[in-house]
Image: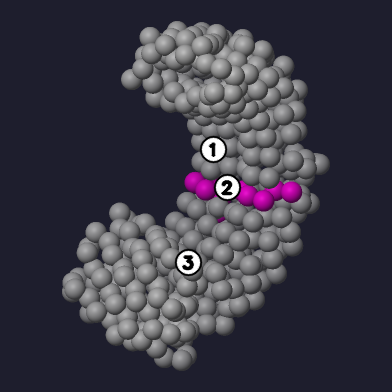
Amino acid sequence: MWGDNGAAQVASCLCASSDGEVTSLGLRGSCIGDEGARSIADALHANTSITALDLASNHIGAPGAQSLANMLRCTTTLKVLDLSSNYICDQGTEHVAAALQANVSLTSVNLQSNRIGAFGANFLAEALLANTTFRSVDLSQNQMGSACAVAAIQANSVSAIDIHDNDIGDEGAGHLADALGGGNVTLKRLNLCNTGVGDRGAELLARALQVNTTITSLALGGNDIGNVGSSAIAVALKNSTSMASLDLQYNYMGIAGAEAFAVALETNRSLTCLGLSNQSVGDPGACSLAASLLKNTTLASLDLRSNSIGKPGAKAFANSMLDNENASLNIVAGLARNARPVVVITLFLQPSLLDPSYDEQQMTVTCRSLAGSELAVLVLLCKSVVLDLRKAASAALIDLSSKHNFRFILPDGRMLQQTMNRMPLYTLLSAKGMSDDAFNQK
């Protein structure tokens, strides 16, 4: 803990240092408070070397924000400012926003978790409209409501906006949709997780995505989107040429939504990462998605954890991998097995890609060594481990370890050895499909 006295000492050092000697200042979690913020701001008034300033989690309120705002009007070198997890509230935001309108150097501003309401959001909207240097803005975890979305759409130069955990609802989603479909050509990454967006908001966003050609990443996890909204987004993805990452985890999509995404994946050639975990896809939805992978050659990651997927869905994915042309597809799925959490990971590994790992339910499994082999399919379950070596080129030495302290060595891709009986193993070397025995418990 530095405190305001420590901040004063740091400020003194900054004033004494030569230009270019210090380029980044990180005081995160140092309890400097308003007085400390004033000391740092005063030291940076004439500083021409600091380009990044991190003052997150420092109990800075409106007075400290005003001091920093005065500094922002003067600096021409500061590019990155992190004020997250403070208490600047609406009053402090007014000072900061006014300074941001005049600032010509900042490219990244983080105001996450600062108790900013709709009043502060209005000031930020004016700043984002006037400023042309911003590239990344984080307004997440505040209480701005739909005003947050109104502020976000004013950012004409920003390529990444994070407003998760602001209750913008369908109204806010509509404002963003108007911007995305109305000519915004700079925004590439948008995080709307936990913002109260429902089916109507998802439909409006989907309509905008059908004409938008710049956005590459959209996060909509933790909302109230069901089959109607997810299906609309899936339809928009069918011919998308820009969307690379889509996160819809923790929504209310069911079989119909999964089937809509399956249809979209058959023609989409831009999406590389799709998150559909913690919903109600079930075996029918899983089978549809698995079938779509026979035609899709670009998807690199598909997350289907906690979707009540059982043996039929798991078999469908395993079989689709045999003929899938995409040699780098990872599938993470949640299989229903007596209501116990089970994780399936499918990895395509080249000999040079060592140490792939995955952490789930506090369990980490790491493939530490691949000696002279191409391991085509590696499926790991929390309760059992399935190794499919049908496409292995030659002998392999594989060391798998976790907190369960198990280790396997596979000479010639055949023999499995385990030191603990808690995790039964199976080898699947048949030429056609995955056998049912692989999913029977011992």
Query: Where residue 235 sits in the image (x, y, percent)?
Result: 69, 61
Q: Position of residue 371 (x, y in %)?
A: 40, 76
333 shown above or below 244: below
Q: Earlier in the sequence, mark 2 or mark 3?
A: 2
Neighbour class for label 3 at 10 Å: few (<14), some, many (≥20)?
few
Residue 24 seen by the camera? yes
Q: Position of residue 65 (x, y in %)?
A: 54, 13
Q: Quadrant of residue 102?
A: top right
Task: Looking at the picture, tell me which residue is in the foreground, 370 or 302.
Answer: 370
- For the record, the magenta segment spans 214-226
Can residue 348 be seen by looking at this rendering? no
Amino acid type, residue under disc 1 in the picture: His
Q: What's the distance in space between the residues labelled 2 and 1, CA to CA?
A: 9 Å
Q: Amino acid at mark 2?
A: Ala
- Locate the C terminus by quadrant: bottom left
Instruction: Return the residue at label 2.
Output: 219
Residue furthest to the bottom in view is 431
Looking at the rendered structure, the kind of residue marked 3 is Leu
- Look at the numbered disc 2 and give the secondary structure of its residue: strand
Residue drawn at the location 50% of the way across and 82% of the way down:
319
Q: How is the image coloured?
A: one colour
Q: SS for tag 3? A: loop
Mark 2 vs mark 3: give the one in front: 3
The crowding category of the residue bearing disc 1, from other C-alpha atoms within 10 Å (few below 14, some 14 to 19, many at least 20), is: many
Residue at (65% x, 16% y) in the render: 75
Q: Quadrant of the N terminus?
A: top left
Residue at which label 3 appears: 353
In the rendered structure, does residue 224 fall within the stretch colored magenta? yes
* Disc nearer the start of the sequence (2/1): 1
Please name the residue that numbered disc 1 is placed on: 164
In the structure shown, which secondary structural element does the residue marked by tag 1 occupy? loop
| Front position in the image: 437 or 98 | 98
